[in-house]
Image: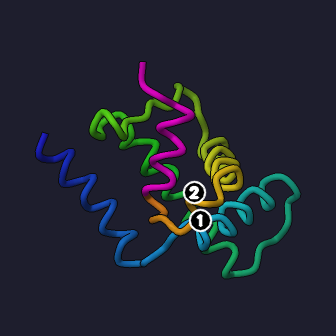
Amino acid sequence: MKFRHLLGLALCLCSAFALADGNSLLPGCQAFINAVDDGQTPTTTQAFKGGHCAGLVQAVGQLGPMLPPEMRSCAPDGASITQGVRIVAKWMKENPSFLNLDETALVTTAFNQVYPCK
């Protein structure tokens, strides 16, 4: 149990040190989607931000079932990172008033709402 809390805390601290919010995360997620859908070659910055978005989505997706109940998410078996990035980008576009919040909190909230545990 302590390991889960430490892991969650580490995840939150990583993005807290970067001071990253949805305003910086959304363009990266969109760059990732554009590269997948259109085969667009991203700039170095877009590639970095897209990889950051995908990595954050993967981390929250894997840790989701271990989070406290009010934050917990359970992605279905076979859900891909690309699917997760699409979900997060869509959620941020539909909830722009939250873009000022921490990026980890945004991804966690999007997954919690889209993939609630049963």
| Image quarter (top left, top right, bottom left or bottom right) of the C terminus | top left
Residue found at x 29% / y 37%: 66
**Please, what secondary structure does the residue beneath circle 1 have?**
helix
Q: Which residues are magenta?
A: 105-118
Q: Quadrant of residue 29?
A: bottom right
* Residue 4 - label: none
- Asked whether the residues under the numbered discs 1 and 2 touch, taking CB atoms below 8 Å apart as contact, a structural biologist would say yes
User: Mark 1 is on which residue type?
Assistant: Gly
Left or right side of 107 for 28: right
**Please, what secondary structure does the residue beneath circle 2 have?**
helix
Of 70 and 107, the residue lying toward us: 70
Residue found at x 30% / y 68%: 13
Q: Residue furthest left?
A: 2
- Residue 26, percent from left and from top: 65, 64
Query: How many circles with numbers are drawn on the protein?
Result: 2
| Image quarter (top left, top right, bottom left or bottom right) of the N terminus | top left
Left or right side of 80 for 8: left
Magenta span main SS: helix
- As measured in the structure, the alpha-carbon distance from the residue carrying label 1 to the one carrying label 2 is 5 Å
Identify the residue position indicated by label 2 in the image: 54
Of 2 and 81, the residue lying toward us: 2
Residue found at x 39% / y 39%: 64
Q: Residue furthest bottom?
A: 44
Compared with 2, 31 (above or below) is below
Instruction: Specify few, some or many for label 2: CA neighbours under 10 Å numbering under 14, 14-19, or 20 or more.
Output: many
- Residue 109, percent from left and from top: 48, 46
Instruction: Specify few, some or many for label 1: CA neighbours under 10 Å numbering under 14, 14-19, or 20 or more.
Output: some
User: Mark 2 is on which residue type?
Assistant: Ala
Identify the residue position indicated by label 1 in the image: 51
Compared with 65, 89 (above or below) is below
